[in-house]
Amino acid sequence: MKMLDTSIKELLAYQNDLDVIYEKDGNVSLEGKIFVNMVYDHFPVQRYYDIKIIVNPESVYLSDVYETGGYIGNYCHKYKDNRLCLATNIDLVISNADNNSLVNFCREYIEQYFFIYEYYTTYGFFPYGDRAHDLEGVKSSYKEITGIKDDLDLARFLLQICRKEYHYRGHLPCPCGSGERTRKCHPKILKLMTDELVYKQICIDFIGMVKEFDEHKRKAK
Ligand SMILES: [Zn+2]
């Protein structure tokens, strides 16, 4: 818990219009405004956004984030329950394993999110390309990391990880099938081996993929 307190303090020092709220259910929330100051492609964003972050103590990158000022209306990267869709969980837990500080989470995902929103509403397209939604988005995260293109091959690979049968060996051929050494071809695969949260997420995503296969089968009958 001490680490989390430090992480919260750091965030409050970095974004000083946020307040800490201790919820009745034991959750800690951060509510108030964050300031976004970013430029990309000669497009500047400098403004405040009203937000609420319900901190996930296990993995701060999996915290629930809401825009509370009613500024973001209908937008494709918002969930039905109004949480902001910041990235896929696997991308979030991998980042969390790299550096689980709230300041980094805020910089890498929340500020980016608002910047991308502004860019998109101005130009009608996304500055660094868009990610698909739901399971398609999840699969595209894994495909980017592993280089595996086929859904079934990807599911097989994730199953190997879930069964702890895959061991990263940089000098062995890459799972993407290129024939190159993994460390030269898709070294990011090592990130799938980082910690227990990443492992858990891979198992959850694998089950999601299997469910989809089953549904396809049922529909095909
Ligand atoms: Zn590869």
Image: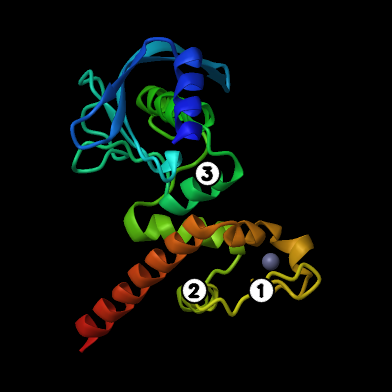
Q: Position of residue 219 (x, y in %)?
A: 20, 81
Q: Residue at x 54, y 69 (%)?
A: 149
Q: The disc labelled 2 sits on which kind of residue?
A: Cys
Between the C-alphas of marks 3 and 2, the distance is: 20 Å
What is the number of the mark on residue 199? none
The mark nearer the N terminus, 2 or 1, is 2
Q: Who's the residue at 36% across and 40% down the image?
A: 56
User: Which amino acid type corresponds to the residue marked 3 in the rendered image?
Assistant: Asn
Residue identifier under label 3? 96
**Quarter occupied by residue 221:** bottom left
Q: Measure the alpha-carbon separation of dots 1 and 3.
A: 21 Å
**Residue type at tag 1:** His
Residue in the picture at 77% in, 75% down: 172
- CA neighbours of label 3 inside 10 A, class few (<14), some (14 to 19), many (20+): many
Which residue occupies the extreme bottom position in the image? 221
> Which of the marked residues, 1 or 3, is nearer the chain's N terminus?
3
Q: Secondary structure at mark 2?
A: helix
Side of 193 where 11 appears, left or right: left
Q: Report how far apart the C-alphas of labels 2 and 1 lie in the structure.
A: 11 Å
For label 1, the crowd category at 10 Å Cα-Cα, with few meaning under 14, some 14 to 19 and many 20 or more, is: few
Q: Which residue is mark 1?
A: 167
Kindly identify which residue carries mark 2: 162
Q: Is residue 13 left or right of residue 21?
A: right
Q: Give the secondary structure at mark 1.
A: loop
Displayed quadrant of residue 47: top left
> For the view shown, which residue lies furthest in the front direction?
2
Horizontal side of 13 relative to 54 (left or right) equals right
Q: Determine whether the residue tagged by mark 3 lies in a helix, strand or loop.
A: helix
Q: Position of residue 49 (x, y in %)?
A: 34, 16
